[in-house]
Image: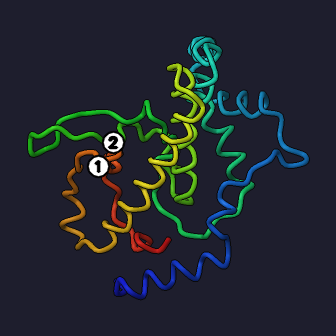
């Protein structure tokens, strides 16, 4: 593995490929595929009798639709520029796919608990989907737009600072990452452990 200083320098150079401010840009591309057709195509290999149940649940509201339409967001994200760092992404990162369960050592872990959509892909996709889910879940819960925005910002900030910390850890330590309590602003460190990747610390 490359030294941490060299990995950081390589990561900084990638900002010339896509600046951090450009990560926030999105608008529907001309010729974008019909969203309904995309969802129908994604359902083509599902059990037919379960599809109406899934569609009914998605119709409950924006957040429910978002949860059931991972392929739709993936199609949109695929049109956006990325820095080029590939990791094993969750593929369906949202707040309802985080949960608590017992670790092999017996203590309670809060982590991603759904890997049905996991694939190698750009790290940006998981971060953007998780941030979007915080906004939609917050709105569903009656949170203000400012509160939703603050939650998304806090998550992204936590991701950034956590990855910076993880990058300096030996592999064995990284595999045993523990959560930290919220700071003075009430912002908790990102709670799920990130699988080790040489990409850590490059952005």
Whole-percent x and y of residue 39? 70, 30
Q: Quadrant of the N terminus?
A: bottom left
Label 1 CA crowd tier, 10 Å (few <14, some 14–19, many 20+): few
Which residue is the extreme one toward the right?
30
What distance separates the C-alpha of mark 2 from that of mark 1?
5 Å
Please tell me which residue is depicted at 52% across the width and 28% down the height of the picture.
138
Q: On the image, numbered disc 1 is attached to which residue?
A: 183
Relative to 175, is 55 above or below?
above
Whole-percent x and y of residue 136? 57, 30
Q: Quadrant of residue 13?
A: bottom right
Whole-percent x and y of residue 64? 57, 22
Q: Quadrant of residue 112?
A: top left
Please tell me which residue is depicted at 24% across the width and 70% down the height of the picture.
171
Q: On the image, numbered disc 2 is attached to which residue?
A: 186
Label 2 CA crowd tier, 10 Å (few <14, some 14–19, many 20+): few
Please tell me which residue is depicted at 61% across the width and 19% down the height of the picture.
58
Q: Looking at the image, which is closer to me, 91 or 14?
A: 14
Whole-percent x and y of residue 198? 40, 74
Relative to 92, is 13 above or below?
below
């Amino acid at each position: 593995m490359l030294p941490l200083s060299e990995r950081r320098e390589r990561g900084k150079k990638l900002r010339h490929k896509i600046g951090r401010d450009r990560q926030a840009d999105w608008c529907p591309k001309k010729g974008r595929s019909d969203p309904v057709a995309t969802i129908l195509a994604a359902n083509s290999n599902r059990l037919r009798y379960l599809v109406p149940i899934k569609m009914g649940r998605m119709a409950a509201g924006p957040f429910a639709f978002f949860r059931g339409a991972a392929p739709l967001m993936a199609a949109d994200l695929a049109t956006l520029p990325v820095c080029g760092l590939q990791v094993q992404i969750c593929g369906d990162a949202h707040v309802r796919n985080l949960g608590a369960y017992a670790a092999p050592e017996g203590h309670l872990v809060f982590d991603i608990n759904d890997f049905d959509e996991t694939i190698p892909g750009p790290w940006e996709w998981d971060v953007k989907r998780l941030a979007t889910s915080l906004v939609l879940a917050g709105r569903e819960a009656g949170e203000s737009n400012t509160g939703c925005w603050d939650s998304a910002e806090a998550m992204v900030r936590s991701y950034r600072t956590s990855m910076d910390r993880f990058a300096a850890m030996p592999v064995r330590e990284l595999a045993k990452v523990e959560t930290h309590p919220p700071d003075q602003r009430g912002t908790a460190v990102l709670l799920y452990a990130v699988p080790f990747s040489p990409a850590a610390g490059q952005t």
